[in-house]
Image (spheres, rainbow, N blue to C red):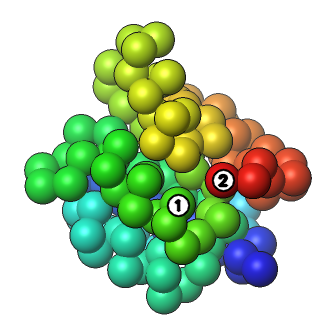
Amino acid sequence: MPNPNVVVVIEDDVDIRSLLSATLEPVGFIVHTAVDGLTGIETVRRVDPAVTTLDVSMPGLDGFETARRIREFSGTRILMVSARVDATEERLAREAGADDYLTKPFRPRELRARVQALVTEPGDAH
């Protein structure tokens, strides 16, 4: 069973990674961060988060492949975050295992609401 107050943020951009942490920590989430897909996968394996935010465009493993690999062992809810507003990309994200999709730039309040909704909604069988 995932830890309900734990979030993993997988994001290569330091400013966005910091913004995500600064947005979620004040509302009670314990945030673990990773700068790339492989590190993020290991972090998810280690801390068993309720929610994982995942950047789509990262060097090395992209967000789609990272999501697929996380789905092999974890029921964490995945919120894909992308600068691209593209229905095809959102479909690909969901096919890779994402539960929700948020485009950059986003309002911190929207991010918090999406993460809190993922924590409280029953998960799909992935």
Residue picked out by circle 1: 71
Name the residue rendered at 51%, 35% in the picture: 95
Can the viewer see residue 25 in this picture?
no
Between 9 and 62, which is closer to the camera in this rendering? 62
- Position of residue 66 relative to residue 108, above or below, is below
Name the image quarter holding residue 100: top right
Q: Is residue 58 left or right of residue 16?
A: left
Name the residue rendered at 69%, 40% in the picture: 114
What mark, if any, has residue 31 been given in the picture?
none
Residue picked out by circle 2: 126
Asked which secondary structure carries label 2, the reply is: loop
Asked which secondary structure carries label 1, the reply is: helix
Cβ–Cβ under 8 Å for marks 2 and 1: yes
- Position of residue 121 relative to residue 92, above or below, is below
Report the amino acid beneath label 2: His
Name the image quarter holding residue 84: top left
Report the amino acid beneath label 1: Arg
Whole-angstrom CA distance, mark 2 to mark 1, is 7 Å
Between 34 and 78, which is closer to the camera in this rendering? 78
Q: Position of residue 5 (x, y in %)?
A: 72, 73
- Position of residue 115 relative to residue 18, above or below, is above
